[in-house]
Amino acid sequence: MKKIAMIFAGQGSQAVGMGKNFYENSDVAREMFDKAGKRIGVDFKELIFEENELLGQTAYTQPAILLVQMVAYRLFKDALNQGGQACSDVKAELFLGHSLGEFSALCASGAINYIDAVELVHRRGQLMQDACSDIEAGMMAIVGLDDASVEKICADAQAQGKKVWPANYNQDGQLVVAGMKADLTSLEQTFKDGGAKRTLLLNMSVASHCELLTPAQIPLESLMESMIEESFEAPIISNVTTAPYSTKDEAVSLLKDQLVKPVRYKQSILAIAGDVDMAIEFGNGVTLKGLNRRIARDMTTLNVSDMDSLAKVAEEVSN
């Protein structure tokens, strides 16, 4: 039996029209959209399928991404269950997500139902926005510079009173930093002088995975305590530690920490590459598939983003 990692991308993977193919071809998808929308008072069809400003706001981006990912995962599991014994025997060896995607991983593992998860990440997004509402926060991608150099520049800047931190370890030569926008922009030339090929200020109004989100930690912890259950189909790889966890207490503690600590995605993939035969990315696009190709060349990554890719992946994993 193949050992499979089920994986989920984070904020930035969204696009207008994502999940529409599922919605148009599945009663289950339409029901999931409707129930999730009623929970948080949002018409997900309008939010996701039509051009609008809300989809770019963290409090709405996060539930939209998670919902589409959970629709993709649910339909994939249904396809396996309908495909005979060989298909139904396909199970996750582990779950892994990038940032927001770790909440999708939690949901896919069975530790929280998708409707609660939609509300949880909606509230998480609101808390993140609130924490950054009175400050000019942001994130910046640093391309072509090694991790140690980025870390040293951030540490030196902190010693000078600047608020900048490494936030997302995506792949070799691509690290996203977070903090105050003025401090980030003031360091652009420093990063380039250090060898960076490019710096790119991202279109973000929050600074994820850094100390600026400390005010959101306690309210998020309370929400998670009330929603997460002691039920894990398989372990989840922590963004914070790169190690697996499979209990409610660990989930609450680690996802609370994840708000203010960097996402070690590259390190997580390297940690699991020898333990799985393949990874399957669920939801819009191929963000993680592209990263995985550059992090661990020998690890196959498939993606389920519409009904056609769902059928192809279900057939491949069951053979």
Image (cartoon, helix red, strand yellow):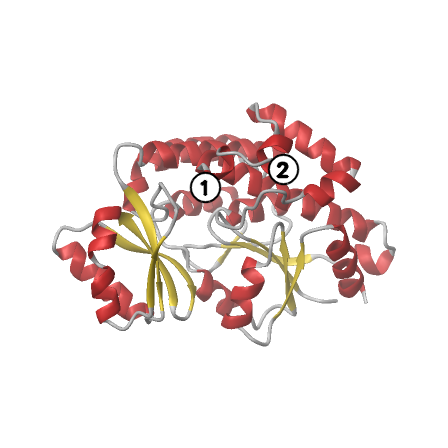
As drawn, 165 above or below 1: above
Identify which residue, 233 or 310, lies in the foreground: 310
Q: Marks 1 and 2, how far apart in space?
A: 32 Å
Which circle, 1 or 2, is nearer the viewer? Answer: 2
Viewer-proximal residue, 201 or 132? 201
Q: At which x and y percent is residue 152?
A: 22, 66
Say which residue appears at 61% left-offset and 39% top-offset. Answer: 67
Q: Amino acid at mark 2?
A: Phe
Q: Is residue 240 above or below residue 142?
A: above
Residue placed at 33% from the left, 70% from the top? 197
Q: Mark 1, residues whose alpha carbon is within 10 Å: few (<14), some, or many (≥20)?
A: some
Quarter of the image where the N terminus is located: bottom right
49 left or right of 60? right
Name the residue at 23% across, 71% down: 194
Q: Nearer the viewer, residue 254 or 11?
A: 11
Does residue 113 appear in the picture of this structure? no
* Residue that numbered label 1 is attached to: 252
Q: Is residue 185 visible?
A: yes
Extreme residue toward the right, this view: 84
Classify residue 262 as left or right of residue 11.
left
Q: Amino acid at mark 1?
A: Val
**Residue drawn where x is 47% and y is 54% of the image:** 238
**Horizontal side of residue 261 vs 85, given as left or right:** left
Residue of label 2:
49
The picture places residue 97, in percent across and down from the top left corner, at 53, 53
The answer to which of marks 1 and 2 sits earlier in the sequence is 2
Q: Does 16 sit above or below residue 305?
A: above
Q: Secondary structure at mark 1?
A: helix
Q: What secondary structure is marked by label 2? A: helix
Furthest toward the bottom, the residue is: 298
